[in-house]
Structure formats: C-alpha cells, structure tokens
Image (tube, helix red, strand yellow):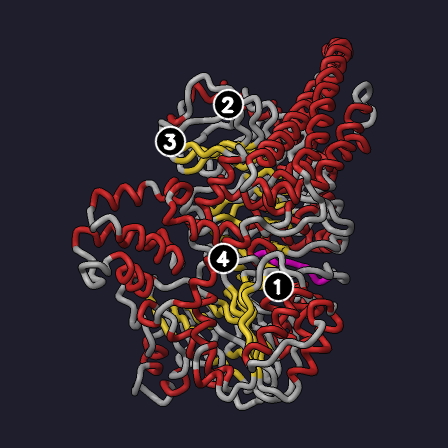
Amino acid sequence: MASEGVVSSLINKLESLLREEAKLLSGVGSEVRRIKDELESIKAFLKDADARAENEEGVKIWVKQVRDVSYDIEEVLDEFVLRLAPPHEHGCVGFLCKCAHFIKNLTVRHRVATGMQNLQTQVHDISNRKDKYALNRTEQGSSSSSTWHDLRVNALFVEEAELVGINKPRNELVEWLLDEDQKLKTISVVGMGGLGKTTLVKNVYDNERAKGNLECYAWITVSESITTEKLLKSMVKEFCKSRKEPVPEGLDSMKDAQLIDELREYLQNKRYVIVLDDVWHLDLWEGVKYALPDCRCGSWIMITTRNNDVASSCKETSGLVYNLKPLPFNEAWDLFCKKAFQSNLGGSCPPELKDLSEKIIKRCGGLPLAIVTVGGLLLKKNESLKEWEKIDQSLGSQLETNDNLQSMKRILWLSYNDLPYYLKSCFLYLSIFPAEKLITSSRIIQMWVAEGFIEEKQGMTVEDVAEGYLEDIIGRSMVQVIESYDDGRVRNFRVHDFVREIVLSKSREENFSTISIELATRLPDKIRRLSLHKNFESMPKNKTFSHLRSFFMFGIDKLPDPSMAAFFTGFRLVKVLDLEDAPIEKFPSEITNLFHLRYLSLRNTKIETLPKSIGKLKNLETLNLKGTSVSELPDEILKLEHLRHLLMYHYASEDYTSFHYMHGVRVPTQIGCLGSLQKLMVVEVNQDSSLIKEVGRLTQLKRLGIIKLRKEDGTELCASIEKMTHLRSFCVQSIDMDEFIDLQSLSLPPPKLQRLYLRGRLEMLPDWIGKLQHLVKIAIRWSRLRVEPLTSLQSLPNLLVLELFKTYEGEELCFKAGGFQRLKMLELREMSGLNQVRVEEGAMPKLQQLYINRCVELKKVPFGIENLKNLKELQLLDMPEEFIERLREGGSEDSWKVVRIPVIQSHYYRIYIEPVHENVF
C-alpha cells in the first residue's frame, strides 16, 4: 500500500515547517512536533502492516486510520498556511488589510491549535493500537507469497502444443548457449509479470541440445522474501538431488560463507546448469553468484526477473540480457483462439465474434498470461456475443471479483507489493491517466515533485531524484516504454491495461484518486485527486471540493462556462492543476487564488494572455504554456520565486524546415530574479541586450531556448552561458535566416551540455563544440558554412545524433576513419551544393539510421556506405531519380552496396506521388 509513503511525505512536510516556518507556527509548534514524533514511531511499523493488511481486516482498518489522519493533518496545516498568507495590497489599503490580517491571525491560530491537539490525540491513540496487532518492524515479505509459488509452478507444466511464439526466443537462447566458448554463461530473461519468462526458460532448460552431458543441475523457484542463506541451501539440495547423493552433514547450520565454499568445491570441474526463477532483488543475486564457479566446462546459469538491475548485473559474468517482448498481434490471436475456442471450434473464431475478439486481444497487450486467462474465462460463455460483450465491458470489475482471474491478478499484484514505500504513491499516480494516454516522463516527474512525493537527497535536485524513481519503476517492468530519446532516456510510456486495472483498484481502495468518466460515476465524500475523462457533465452539481489536491481533464471537448468560476473557487488546497488540451479560451481568473498551486499546465489551450494576478501564485513551480498563443509574460511573473520550469513556445508550422517555425515568448527584462529556474523555453530576446545579460543570473538552468538573436549580442550571450554549469540543453536561433550567430567567445562551455541546437548563419563552427565531452545530439541548421564541419565534430566521444540541415555549401563531405565512433543517427538535409559523400572504413561503426533528404546534386550513393555494417535503415526524401535508380536491384553497380541494409525507403513529398519503394530494394 501507499500508506507508508503518505506518512513519510507528511513527516517531511512537518520537518520542513518546523525548520523553515518557525515564526508562522507560533502557538501550534509544540503540537506539530509531537505529531511528527508519533508519526515517526508509527512509520516504523507500517511496512509490516501493509504486507498483512491484504489478509487481516483489523490491520487493514488500522492502516486506513493512519492514512486518513495523515491526510487530515496535512489539510489542517495547508489551510492554516493559506489563512495566514499575508495580503497582496500596498499603501493605505495594504496597511488596513494587514491590521485586519493580524486580528484574524489570533483567531486562526487558536482554532488551529485546538484542531492540532485533537489530531495529536488521535495519532497517539492509533499509535497505541498497533500493539494489538503484534506489528513487527523487522518482519519481511508478503503474506501472499505462498499462493504465488503454487501459481508459478503451473508454468513448468505447459504442454508444447499449447505454446505460441516461443520457438524464436528459445532457439536464440539455445544457440547462444551452444557457443564454442566453454566459459560459464549467464542469461537473464527480463520482462513484466505474465510475459512467459518461466515457460520460455523451462523450454530451454529441457532442450536436449542445450543440456548436453550434464553432471548436475538445479531449478530453484525464488520467493520475494527468501534470504541468501536459504537460497544457497536450496541450491546444494537440488544439485545433490540431481546426482542422487545425500546432502552434506550439518547443512542446516551452515552460514553464507560456508555454503559458498561448499558449493564451489562441489561444482569444481563439473558441467552444471542452474535456473533461478523470478529473482526480485539485486542483492540476492550478488550474494549467490560467487558460489557458482567458472570451471570452463560449458556450464550455464539462467535467471528470470522483472528487475532490469538484476538482469544487467549478469553481464559481469559473460552474461546476456534477453528482454522478452509481448506477443505480436498475429501470435496473440493464435494463442487466444487456441484457448477461447478449443471446445467445439477447434481454435477457429466465429465471424460474429471476430471484431470483439480483436478488441479483447488488443486490451491484453500481447501479455500471454492475460490472453490465456481471459480466453479461458470466455471459453465458458459458449461463444455468446451478448455474454462476451458483458465480459469486455466489465473486465476491470471482473479482475477484482471473478475467481477465474484471481491468479493473473496475484501475479501482476506482486510487482506493486514489492515496490519500496516511496514508489507506491508515484505508481498509484499513474491511475489518473486514461488507458490510451501516453504518459510523458517530464510531465509525470513535475507532478510528483509538486505533490511532494519526492524525498530530497543531498547533491541532487528533486527532479533528478524523481527521474531515478521513474527509472526504478521502468526497470521493474511495471510500465511499457513507447518512445525514448537519443541518449536512452524514456520520453513516454504507458501502463498495460491489466496493470492499470490493478492500479485503479488499489487507488479506489485507498481513496488515492477518483476517475470520473460516466454520468453515473459515484464519487466519494472526500476527493483528493480528481481526473475527468471525456465528459465534464459527469460532475454532479453543487459538489464541493474542499479536500481536493489535484485536478486533471482528459478529452473534454466542451466546458459549461457559467459553472467554471464556482468550480475552480472550491479548489482551495489544490497543488496540481492540469488543463492540457482543455477547450479554454481565456485564463480562468479564479486560478490565481490557489495559493498552494505548484503545477499549472495550460498546454495546447487557446489562451492568449496571462493576467497580472498570476503573481499571486507564490508557490508555483511549473508553468506550462506550450502550444498556446501567449506571446508575452506580465511583469508580475517575477513574483513567482519558486518557479522551476517555465515552458512557453508554440509552432507556427508543422514543417520544421521553415526558418520561423517556432515562436517564443517575450519575458520581463528582470527575469534573472527567478533564480530557481531549471527550464526556460523559449525566450524572444527582441534586440534586448540587457535581457541576454540578465539570463546569466539563472545559474541553475538545465534547459534554455533563445530565439531572435542578433550577431552583436553573441558576446553577451556567451558570457551568460559560461555561468550555467548545469546546462544540459541549449537552443539558439538568429533573428532571421541571413543574420549570423556569433558564439566564438564562449571559452568555458557548460561541462554537462548534452544537446545543442544552432539555427542561423555561422561564419565558422565554434571551436568549443569539439570540447563537449557529454554531447549526445547536435543539430546545425541554416548555417550555410563554407568550411566543412565534420572535422570539429568527429572526435566527440558520446555523440549519438548528428543533424545537418542547410549546414554546408561545399560539394563534398568526408567521414574519416576513426571518426564518430558512437554515432547512431545521421541526417543530411537540403545541402544544395553537395555532390559527393564519402565514408572511410572505420568511420561511424555504430551508425544505424541514415537520412538523406533533398540533396539535389547528390546523384550517387555515399562512397563506402558498404562499410557501415550496423546500418539498419536508409531513408530518402525527394532525392534525384538518378540517385534512386542506382540503388534499384540490377540498376547499377551501386545496388550491392546497400543489399545488407534491412530497410530502405524513398518518398517524394513536394509533389505527392506513390513512394518509389516502401520495402527493401
């Protein structure tokens, strides 16, 4: 459960208030301190309580009481801070307001002190009741683990005829194991629960070619709570059992070191095989791997895991990580039909059920466990369309109540139970997004930070810590990565439909979030996080939201304008307000009264201006105006001293080849006073040299975008950039396509710079670019250089992506031997004079994607392209017909140079015609 996270978050908040708001807490500080001490005592027992709450009603009620009182305390404190916030007026009116505010403070403090005393009494009583349930802070593991063992064993006895999609991965693993090298091999099969890891590994384990002449073998089914000592003892017993030998005397009394020695001696000079099925934690594998010696006898170890950290660790021992993927649709269809129609149709789907079957299969997301389980459930419905539709519409509730689905629920549930407390609230937060919605990493990270889920770590920003949280969740195979950035960071992801149903179930149980979709949606009395999907009318009239902390809208096409003012007025304690894509044309003025608001997204709305009252949002950390028509920020934005992310640009055209395709926003000249800013995208400098100098005060910036820069402002910009030691991404564009960008005077470039975008004329490529050791991506556009730029870039050690668009006016580009050692993607676009590209042997050895677009004088395939052994994709856009003809099979001597490239495509976009070729030439 997320209860431990709720309590931990509250303790952190109490500590912060006691440390930073001592004056504000005058009169209630002692109650706050006593509550914090009681909560710290309770927290020590919550891990055990959370593990037992699933099966013990009394413990479950106790945990709920802890959670509810924690929420109540947080609300009282936030209401207290809100009421004591000083007035904004100045002058005589301000003086009178301050006098009234002082008098009101006395009443508020007295009321809050009384309330806190009552809450402190409740916390004390709850703390005393923990002894009633014999809660033990040292007890580990989940009470459901024994059930999990029984379920998992089923995968070991699946008949060969029932398997689908296993041949290819099994054959790949067997071939790797049969490599002539006799050293110990380790294979880690990683993926989310239900993908069929155990079934796959069992097929490899049983394969006669892979096993060969074994002397001993062992299959160990690992539990979540097993200790290293127990696992080592199980290994000894299984090896002895395989050779029909007695176990060593005194085995039960041996400790870790003795057991490792025993195993190493026993396995010396033997060819052995061992499978560790479902390893959850890295420390467990680290504790046992030294017991398995490399005797150069062709032995091998196989591990199944949901944790990427465990999988990656096996690489240290000549290991291979095999990421098991969901089944493609055709194989998912075969598996579903085998299960759902096995009784009387021999695995054939009747026509009237085809569309519904396809829909259900897509919901299963290629997860074999889901396909088999749901198919088995539908098998009992006798191919009745009406019955099948009922199941499809109620799969979420079926997952909670139908006994036939409980085994799948338990398997998926274990991944959530295994999360550390600080990740559970983060994971439950994913419930707010619709099933089909891709979740952007930066968006969810900023929300987590605004909610207060992230624990501070010395030397790291909370965003860096939150990114680590997300990497941990991804590494545990709990979400599906859809798209990644060039450097491997995840751009967006989604939650598997059935995992999402479990998240929704837990979220409802803990009243963590409320999802309103239909008109008949029943809403709880206390709503803390509200997510509206598709229909604003589903909201009941006159509903109050005094407990609301976060509000989201998805797919809302129309808003009832008259009720919106009252609607936002009730959001007194809201921290997160996400109105992305909402049909809002004017900034709702009521929003500026939300004192606690930390995250505000108006992305892709139709608003054009911000009110001056925006300055009242003193606690705002993220303001997202991307995709709006806001062109200028009011001076009052400078009052938002906690602002960390200011995102404000839109695209005037979908064609990024247009020079003015991106528009930024004019900001107040004194923007440098916002010293907490980490992202500032995109600022129009508009011939304001003082603004460029002011930007240099923003030393915490990680991402910066500057457009409409003049040549004479280049020196000042360089001076500002030199102060930004944390800068990771920098985008600069000149005021028009003929204006030069002068960045030569930058002597100390940001040491951590990873992405660089230069858009405008360059007399020469700045020398400092060649010193950027961490640079991953560089895009040079409209520069029209007369000096070949590759020499300055070829030695960059971490460069993965190189985009050259109207970059060079010369006739030849040569990628020299030894250059661009890590480059994976290269784009050459609209270099009108280019007539030859040369690739020397040893250049770009890891290149996978090559795009050549509208280079009208380039008539021949790059000389030496056959040297690019890892090239997987060649994309051509609007290239001369002569170039294309030379690539056609049998067209010329050039066709053999590209025959090894799996995907070659050619398109014409200027005047639409059918693509010359969509597949391999």
The residue tagged 1 is 309
The residue tagged 4 is 481
Whichever of callouts 2 and 1 sits on the residue coming sooner in the sequence is: 1
Image coordinates of residue 442 in percent, x first then y, are: 57, 48
Amino acid residing under circle 3: Asn
Q: Residue furthest left?
A: 351
Whichever of callouts 3 and 4 sits on the residue coming sooner in the sequence is: 4
The residue tagged 2 is 525
Mark carried by residue 535: 3
Whichever of callouts 1 and 3 sits on the residue coming sooner in the sequence is: 1
Mark carried by residue 690: none
Viewer-closest of 76 and 283: 283
Amino acid residing under circle 2: Asp
Residue 918 visible (yes or no)? yes
Which part of the image, by quadrant, shows the C terminus?
Answer: bottom left
The magenta region covers 738-744
Whichever of callouts 3 and 2 sits on the residue coming sooner in the sequence is: 2
Whichever of callouts 4 and 1 sits on the residue coming sooner in the sequence is: 1
Secondary structure state at the residue bearing disc 4: strand
In the image, residue 582 sits, relative to residue 97, either above or below, namely below
Instruction: Indicate left or right for 396 with 2 as reference.
Output: left
